[in-house]
Amino acid sequence: MKQQQNAFWVGTYHGRHDGTPVTVTATRDDTRPEPYAWTCTCGAFQDFPTEHGLFPTAWRHTHPTRFDQLRQWAARRFRTRHAR
Ligand SMILES: [Zn+2]
């Protein structure tokens, strides 16, 4: 993925989604309306006005709790059922 020129690296998180290794990269870019953001190799993206919320959500995204996993499983099941 191409990094924007003004973006500063602030952190990298390694984790898994259902056994697939993923990497979340957190950056700060003062030219953006919401300077703090992270992107995941799975395509997920979130931005924040301050660094508050950045690290917990990035960590949570790479290390889903049992409840998150259950929710993801339920969401997948729901999508699959409707795709048929
Ligand atoms: Zn992800």
Image (tube, rainbow, N blue to C red):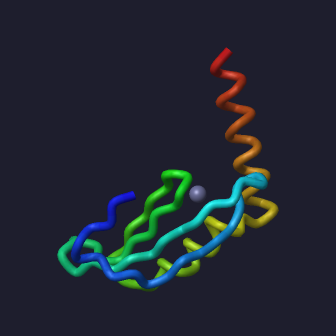
Position of residue 17 in the picture relative to residue 32 (left or right): right
* Towards the viewer: 10 or 57: 10
Considering only vertical position in the picture, is 48 above or below 75? below
Residue furthest to the top: 84
Give the residue at x 48% y 78%.
Answer: 54
Q: Position of residue 42 (x, y in %)?
A: 55, 52
Position of residue 20 in the picture relative to residue 9 (left or right): right
Residue 46: quarter of image: bottom left
Considering only vertical position in the picture, is 7 above or below 65? below
Residue 6: quarter of image: bottom left
Q: Position of residue 77 (x, y in %)?
A: 74, 33
Residue 37: quarter of image: bottom left
Give the residue at x 23% y 72%.
Answer: 5
Q: Position of residue 65 (x, y in %)?
A: 76, 66
Quadrant where the image shows the N terminus: bottom left
Give the residue at x 62% y 65%.
Answer: 61
Residue furthest to the left: 31
* Towards the viewer: 71 or 63: 63
Ligand number 1: quarter of image: bottom right
Give the residue at x 36% y 77%.
Answer: 36
Considering only vertical position in the picture, is 40 above or below 53? above
* Towards the viewer: 21 or 84: 21
